[in-house]
Image: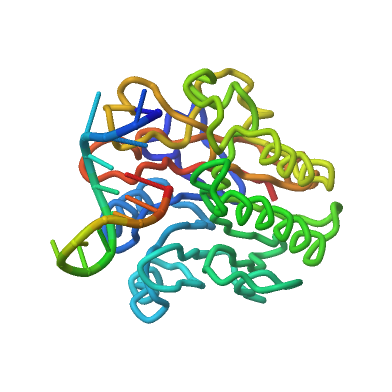
DNA sequence: ATGGTGGCCCGGCCA
């Protein structure tokens, strides 16, 4: 029997595979919080971003002792993505599988008991006139090629992580404040639409149409307490997964307390 | 949000 979801306000007990994604903003700094959260919520699969460490120091043994297999694609003090699973972990693929490999560690793919999962950390972009923004747009194009290369729209696929893109105006606290900024520009949103056109659905938004659900709040200015957030961490899934997603949430409680990440975990429960 | 925080690891850069 499955448990409830720890500190998450679920109105019921749920059954199925619980898949979570979380930008931890340094796994070294965040390991105690991550372990506490994992014990509390018991995800079956956890995708992480911004581990900010090398593969050599990734705490695979710690996660193994907690019952998780793991795969990590890191590069040092920046970026770094991981997949933890107690539902099987096979066919691990670092980086893009087609085209030019990225020079940064931002994407890792694996198969977890019939579902292919991709942990993505999309480049921030910095500013619309910055070359990093062009890197972000081309990165999203390469992600689309990667997705098309690893799966068909009829497969079980979850592409989740920190997209650094708010899909719509309802996903930000103040559209005026963000005018001319990254994360909300039309070209970025067009890249998300391309993934949608291929067959990936924003299942959390489908299940939570209300505005004001965010996954990231700036550390500065008391943004969290003022409600200045954005929903930029997304779980994009194919139809077979979306149609079997029985529950989803953003665990904003994880943004509270001592030494939080600036991102909250996003969860989906998929019945099997 | 023009940056007041927090990550990297010790001088700024990045988010």
Is residue A141 depicted above or below A9 in this figure? below
Q: Position of residue A222 (x, y in %)?
A: 27, 27
Question: Could you say which is closer to the camera, residue A272 or residue A119?
Answer: A119
Question: Could you say which is closer to the camera, residue A149 or residue A265?
Answer: A149
The quarter of the picture where residue A217 lies is top left
Q: Residue at x 47, y 21 (%)?
A: A177
Q: Residue at x 59, y 43 (%)?
A: A15
Q: Residue at x 33, y 27 (%)?
A: A223
Q: Position of residue A123 (x, y in %)?
A: 54, 53
The quarter of the picture where residue A109 lies is bottom right
Is residue A126 depicted above or below A28 in this figure? above
Question: Could you say which is closer to the camera, residue A180 or residue A145?
Answer: A180
Q: Position of residue A190 (x, y in %)?
A: 74, 39
Is residue A262 depicted above or below A179 in this figure? below
Q: Position of residue A189 (x, y in %)?
A: 69, 37
Is residue A48 depicted above or below A222 in this figure? below
């Amino acid at each position: 029997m499955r448990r409830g979801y720890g500190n998450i306000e679920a109105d019921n007990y749920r059954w199925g595979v619980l898949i979570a994604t979380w930008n931890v903003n340094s796994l070294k700094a965040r390991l105690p919080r991550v372990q506490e959260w994992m014990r509390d919520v018991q995800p079956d699969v956890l995708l992480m971003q911004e581990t900010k460490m090398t593969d050599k120091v990734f705490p695979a043994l710690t996660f193994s002792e907690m019952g998780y297999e793991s795969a990590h694609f890191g590069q040092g003090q920046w970026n770094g993505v991981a997949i933890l699973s107690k539902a099987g972990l096979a066919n691990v693929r670092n980086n893009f599988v087609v085209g030019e490999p990225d020079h940064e560690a931002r994407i890792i793919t694996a198969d977890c008991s019939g579902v292919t999962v991709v942990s993505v950390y999309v480049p921030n972009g910095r500013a619309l006139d910055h070359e990093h923004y062009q890197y972000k747009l081309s990165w999203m194009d390469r992600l689309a090629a990667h997705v098309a290369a690893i799966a068909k729209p009829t497969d079980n696929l979850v592409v989740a992580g920190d997209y650094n893109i708010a899909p719509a105006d309802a996903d930000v606290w103040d559209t005026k404040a963000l005018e001319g900024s990254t994360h909300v520009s039309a070209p970025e949103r067009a890249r998300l639409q391309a993934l949608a056109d291929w067959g990936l659905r924003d299942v959390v938004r489908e299940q939570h149409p209300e505005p004001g659900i965010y996954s990231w709040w700036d550390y500065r200015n008391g943004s969290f307490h003022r409600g200045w957030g954005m929903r930029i961490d997304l779980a994009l899934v194919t139809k077979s997964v979306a149609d079997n997603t029985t529950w989803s949430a953003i665990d904003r409680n994880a943004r509270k307390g001592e030494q939080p990440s600036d991102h909250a975990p996003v969860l989906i429960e998929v019945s099997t």
